Amino acid sequence: MAFEIRADSYNFLNHPQFNNPNNTITFAKDPVTGIYSLSPSSAGGQITSANNFGPGRIIQMGGRFSF
């Protein structure tokens, strides 16, 4: 006879999975000099959201008795 206890976990530390960085860069023209520069409202290269497909962490336990 034997008894077995088992525990499995997935994403135990619950690390976030970030989406790809934003690839939109906007430029603004200075009305005085006429020079184009990066707009202050540009979100290029920023990561603004996380990928939340599925549950955050999964933990399961089980036992088996063999005779």
Image (cartoon, helix red, strand yellow):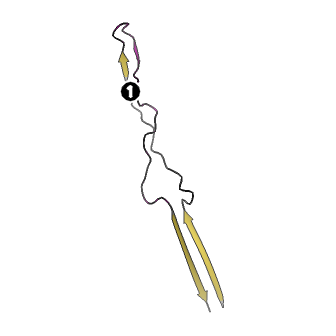
Residue 3 screen position, x and y as percent? 64, 85
Whether residue 55 is in magenta: the answer is yes
Q: Which residue is painted at 42% across and 44% down in the image?
A: 49
**Quarter of the picture holding the C terminus:** bottom right
| Quadrant of res 35 | top left
Q: Is residue 21 left or right of residue 3?
A: left
Residue drawn at 54 percent across, 52 percent down: 15
Residue receiving disc 1: 41
Determine whether the residue tagged by mark 1 lies in a helix, strand or loop.
Answer: loop
Q: Where 13 sits versus 19, above or below?
A: below
Outermost residue, right side = 1
| Image quadrant assignment for residue 21 | top left
Quadrant for residue 44, please give it: top left
Question: Is residue 41 depicted above or below 29 in this figure?
Answer: below
User: Which residue of the protein is positioned furthest toward the left in this rendering?
Assistant: 31
Q: Quadrant of the N terminus?
A: bottom right
Q: Position of residue 10 (x, y in %)?
A: 54, 62
**Above/below status of 50 relative to 25:** below
Residue 36 drawn at (x, y percent): 39, 14
Which residue is pictured at 62% across the width and 79% down the height? Answer: 5
Q: Position of residue 7 (x, y in %)?
A: 59, 72
Q: Is residue 63 magenta?
A: no
Say few, some or many: other residues with alpha carbon within 10 Å of mark 1 (under 14 / 14 to 19 / 20 or more).
few
Q: Residue at x 39, y 22 (%)?
A: 39
**Total of numbered circles in the picture?**
1
Kindly report the secondary structure that dominates the magenta region of the rendered protein.
Answer: loop
What span is colored magenta in the figure? Answer: 30-56
Look at label 1 and name its amino acid: Ser
Above-or-below relation of 28 to 25: above
